[in-house]
Image (cartoon, coloured by chain):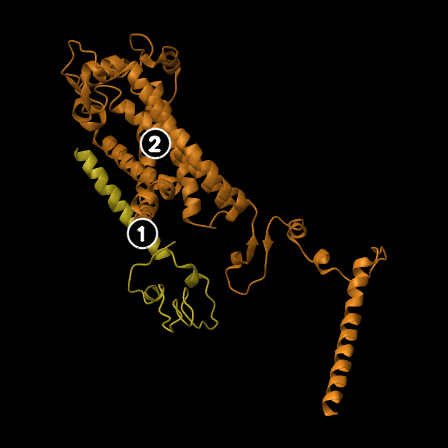
Amino acid sequence: MKAFAVAVICAVAIGIAASYILSSSQRFAWQAFSTSSARVSQPGTNLVGPRWTGDATGPHDAVAGETTAPKRS
Amino acid sequence: MRRQTTRIRTFVAAAMLAGFAGTAALPALAQQSAPPTTTPTTAPNPTADSVNEDMLFKQGPKIGGRISIPDQKAANLIQPQGREWRGFHETWMPWIGAAAILGMVALLGLFYFTRGRIRMEHSEESGRKILRFNGFERFTHWMTATCFIILALSGLNYIFGKRLLMPVIGPDAFATLSQWAKYAHVYLAWPFMLGIVFMFVVWLRDNIPNRIDLQWIKAGGGFIGKGHPHAERFNAGQKVVFWMVAGFGTAMGVTGLMMLFPFAATDINGMQIMQGIHSLIGVAFIAAILAHIYIGSLGMEGAYDAMGSGKVDLAWARAHHDLWVEKEQARTASGPQLRTHHAPAE
C-alpha cells in the first residue's frame, strides 16, 4: 500500500512538472506564427463582435492578456 | 380627331414592339431548330482549360497555395492522405477497438467460467512468506500501472467518447471531461514512460528467454492439465508480458512524442500515420493488460500479494516459480545476502 501511495504521488508530481515544462516551451499558433504586420482585432474575433453588436470582445482576449491559464488545442 | 390620332399611334407602337420581339426570338428559334454543327471553334473553353484537382495532383502529392505568414504549413490546401486517415479513425478504428477490448473481456469471461479461478495449492510451507518484489519494484509497477489506466481511459475517450459518453452526459460535460482527459493523457504520459524505463532496467535480467520457457510453453503453463512446469523468477507468460510492455510502451511513447511535438520530426502525413499506429497499439495494449490484470487478481489466488505487500505464500511460490525459490533460498542461506536482500525463505 505504501509503494502504491508513493507511486501515485510521484506520478501526479511528475505529471504536474511536465505540464509546467511543456507550458513554458509552447505557444499558441497565433503567437508563434504571427507577423509584424498590423492586426486589427484579436484572433478569434472580428470588428463587429460575435453577435454583430460592436462588442468585439472574444474568447482569446483574456488569453492575450495572460490573465488565465492558457488553453491549448 | 385627337382620340383617333392617339389610337393610330398606339397601334403603330404595338406593331413595332411586336416586330422587335419577333426579331429577337428568331435566333433562339433558329438555334432550336438548326441541326448541330461540327464546325470547330477557336474560342477558349474556361471549364475545360481551367486547373483542376486531378491536374494539380499530377504535379505533387499535395495541393498548396502561396501565403505571406511565417507558418508555411498553412499554405497546404489539400492533402488526400488526410481523408484516408479521417476515414480510418472515424470508421475502422472504433470497430477495431471494440473488437479487441470486448473480445478480450469475452475471452477472459469464458476462461473464468470454464477453467475457474486457479486456487492456491496448500502444503507444509503454506503460511510462510517470501519476498517476491521489493519496494522499488512495486513502486515502479504501480506508477506505470496507475498512469496506464488513466492513459487508457482518456485514450479510449478519443475513440468512443463522442459516441458513447456524450449522448449520456451531454455535450457541455463531455467537453469539460475531454479537456481534462486530454491534459491527463498528455502529462501522465511522462511518468508512464519513466516507469517503462524503470521496469525495463529492473526486470530485464530475469526476462531473458531460455529453454525453461520452451518447456513451460509445451506444458501449457500449468493452465492445461495438472501440475506446474518449472519456472524461474518469471515464467514464459510473464516474459511475454514484460516484452510486450517494453515494446508497446516504447512504441506508444515514440508515436505519442511525435504528436506531442507536432512537425518536430515528421510532417502532417507522418503524424497521421503515427496517430494510426498509436491507436492500434493502444487498443492491443489495453486488451493485453486486461488479461494481465485478470491473472494477477481474480484469475489466480495468491498472485496479487506479489504486487500488494510484495510477499507471497511460499507454497504458492514453490508451485509457480520453483526454480526461483530454490535460488533465493540458496542465496539467503549463504549469509551476507540476508542483510541486503529481504528474501528470507524462513
Question: In x, y percent, where is residue B243?
Answer: 38, 27
If the image is split into quadrants, where does the C terminus of chain B sit?
top left
Q: Name the residue located 29 percent from the left edge and 49 percent from the top edge.
A: B173
Q: Is residue A10 left or right of residue B93?
A: left
State the count of labels.
Answer: 2
User: In this figure, which residue is indicated by the disc labeled 2?
Assistant: B200
**Mark 1 on the same chain as mark 2:** yes
Q: Name the residue located 17 percent from the left edge and 9 percent from the top edge.
A: B123
Q: Disc 1, disc 2: CB below 8 Å?
A: no
User: In this figure, which residue is indicated by the disc labeled 1?
Assistant: B172
Residue B277, numbered circle: none
Q: Which chain is orange?
A: B
Q: Is residue B82 left or right of residue B224?
A: right
Looking at marks 1 and 2 on the same chain, the residue that comes earlier in the sequence is marked by: 1
Question: In x, y percent, where is residue B187?
Answer: 32, 46
Compared to B272, does A48 lie above or below?
Answer: below
Q: Amino acid at mark 1?
A: Asp
* Displayed quadrant of residue B40: bottom right
Q: Nearer the viewer, residue B33 or B135?
A: B33
Q: Is residue B326 left or right of residue A27?
A: left
Q: What is chain A's hue in the picture?
A: yellow
Q: Nearer the viewer, residue B276 or A33?
A: B276
Visible residue check, residue B90: yes
Q: Residue furthest front?
A: B1
Dot 2: element: helix
Q: Residue furthest top?
A: B226
Q: Residue furthest right?
A: B39
Q: Amino acid at mark 2?
A: Phe
- Chain for numbered disc 2: B
Q: Name the residue located 34 percent from the left edge and 14 percent from the top edge.
A: B221
